[in-house]
Image (cartoon, rainbow, N blue to C red):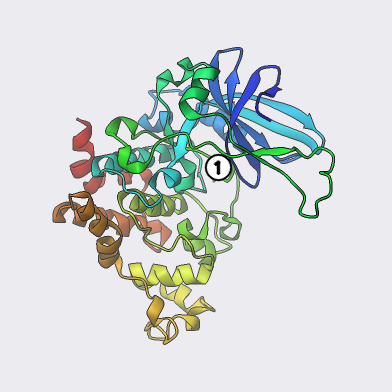
Amino acid sequence: MIGDVLHSRYQVIDKLGFGGYSTVWLARDTHRNRYVTLKVSVSNSIQRETKVLKALSAPPSSSPHPGRGLVPVFLDEFEVQGPNGKHICYTVVPAQCNLREASFSRLFPLEVARALSYRLAQAVYIHSQGYVHGDIHLNNVLVKLSSSFDELSIQEFYEKYGEPETVPITRRDGEPLPPNTQAKAVVPLFLGKFAERFSLSDAYPVLVDFGEAFAPASEARLGQDCHTPIVSRAPEAKFESQMLLAYPSDIWSPGTTIWEIIGMKAIFSTECIDEDEIVSQHIDVLGPMPSEWWQRWEERPRFFDEYGNPTESYKENVWPPLEESFEIGVQTWRRKMGGEIEEDEKAAFLDLMRRMLAFRPEERPTAEEVLMSDWMVKWVLPQFS
């Protein structure tokens, strides 16, 4: 609860978020007099993330890659014994809200969207360090905090962001709460600002949640074991379920993520939970899939006939092809903001999207090639100079 001190050091200030495997708190490190993100894993879980973060936080043997500062800096690790078992806890440098929260039904200024896209691609430098992230999407891209954040006292923090919000916990049957159940739950804090208020100085993302990360050189990860959300999942995870995943599968996800950063509407449905429906959208937007996948796709008759024409039941749900998707999901909203993307930049951006979202993984660019693409070099980099 708020005010608890863990490891005789970390005072819990507010809740930042939660997921299926952990709860994330903002805490004050009373030894170093600074704020930290404190991640508490569910009891008796196997912690994979700390190993990866420790490796990425180790001092580089040569000059550091520019993307090094765009992943969490690992600080500390300890265990807490609770009523349900042992919890592994660790701390990293804190960050603001994720880009999903910041951009929901909102649009980043174009120069900010370009910068966020470039730096997200820089964060994928982890490939050069031997790691695949495995779960890149807007929820896992946070925004860096100002260096002055640590100067806030706890009281000043509450004056600026408000006291923690709590809701009572009750049983539906009206009976008393069981032992070890908290009387109140803390509502996660929105620590940040909305997309339209971002400036270039805010455009420093942090790629987080390395719970699905792995090193292809030492760990086999099959397509069937991919846990990336289906809207951001590379198609080989479905159609080559026994194939070893590697770095190219980690390029598809940033492709879908960059599209959302630049525009308002995702390139594929973010509300769909049907894997085969997402596959049909891949074909609608990007064109024909590899013929061997087409022949093996058992659910294809739900969406297309043997010639690739949409079925009667699917016709009303067909997604627009890439250029039309850009017009609907990006350009229309940019015009409403007072400035559309010029044709030359549009062509370069769509070319990059086609490459990052190539069906065959071997046809996708590397992270470094993404950074050296025409769109990045001609339209994104000049605004940094």
Q: Position of residue 3 (x, y in %)?
A: 66, 23
Quadrant where the C terminus is found in the figure: top left
- Find residue 298 and report its image quarter: bottom right
Q: How many marks?
A: 1
Which residue position is annotated with label 1? 215
Of residues 190 and 358, the one nearer the viewer is 190
Q: Visible in this render: residue 113?
A: yes
- Find residue 65 and report its image quarter: top left
- Find residue 169 and report its image quarter: top right
Q: Residue at x 41, y 87 (%)?
A: 312
Q: Visible in this render: residue 289?
A: no
Q: Is residue 261 left or right of residue 138?
A: left
Against 219, residue 159 (above or below) is above
Of residues 315 and 351, the one nearer the viewer is 315
Q: Residues within 10 Å of mark 1 (few under 14, many from 20)?
A: some
Q: Position of residue 133 (x, y in %)?
A: 50, 44
Q: Residue at x 35, y 55 (%)?
A: 356
Q: Position of residue 229 (x, y in %)?
A: 52, 56
Against 265, residue 140 (above or below) is above
Q: Position of residue 87 (x, y in %)?
A: 73, 34
Helix, strand, or loop for circle 1?
loop
Mark 1: which amino acid?
Ala
Quadrant where the N terminus is found in the figure: top right
